[in-house]
Image: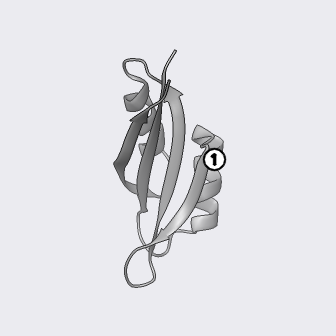
């Protein structure tokens, strides 16, 4: 079965959000294949999450719902989606 590699950009609710704690909550919730920080503006960072999921209907929506439910997450943006074989 094919899989999809999805890259998300996650924006914290504000500069007061502890990014170490937010990353830990993301890891516990979705077990990402890769996670890193990316600088934005004025010393703020977004969190980049890469996750491989089954290429099945509803899986990406389920992942976004899980990410949106994490305390400290403001916005989520899919920046890349690639199908594997």
Could one spot residue 30 in this view of the protein?
A: yes
Mark 1 residue crowding within 10 angstroms, few (<14) / some (14–19) / many (20+): some
Could one spot residue 71 in this view of the protein?
A: no
In this view, the residue in front, 32 or 73, is: 32
In this view, the residue in front, 63 or 22, is: 63
* Quarter location, residue 83: top left
In this view, the residue in front, 35 or 81, is: 81
User: Residue 56: x and y, percent?
Assistant: 42, 18
User: Residue 36: x and y, percent?
Assistant: 57, 61
* Quarter location, residue 9: bottom left
SS at mark 1 in the image: helix
* Quarter location, residue 57: top left
Please tell me which residue is depicted at 43% across the width and 56% down the height of the picture.
10
Q: In the displayed orientation, state which residue is furthest to the front.
A: 85
Q: In the displayed orientation, state which residue is furthest to the bottom.
A: 42
Q: How is the image coloured?
A: one colour
Please tell me which residue is depicted at 38% across the width and 22% down the height of the picture.
58
Can you identify the residue that label 1 sits on? 27
Q: How many marks?
A: 1
User: Residue 59: x and y, percent?
Assistant: 43, 25
In this view, the residue in front, 26 or 69, is: 26
User: Residue 27: x and y, percent?
Assistant: 63, 47
Please tell me which residue is depicted at 63% across the width and 65% down the height of the picture.
20
Q: In the displayed orientation, state which residue is furthest to the top.
A: 1
């Amino acid at each position: 079965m094919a899989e999809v590699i999805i890259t998300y950009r996650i924006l914290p609710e504000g500069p007061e959000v502890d990014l170490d704690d937010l990353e830990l909550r993301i890891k516990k919730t979705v077990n990402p294949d890769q996670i890193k920080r990316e600088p934005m503006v004025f010393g703020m960072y977004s969190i980049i999450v890469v996750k491989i999921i089954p290429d099945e209907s509803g899986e990406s929506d389920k992942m976004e719902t899980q990410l949106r439910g994490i305390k400290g997450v403001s916005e989520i943006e899919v920046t890349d989606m690639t199908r594997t074989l």
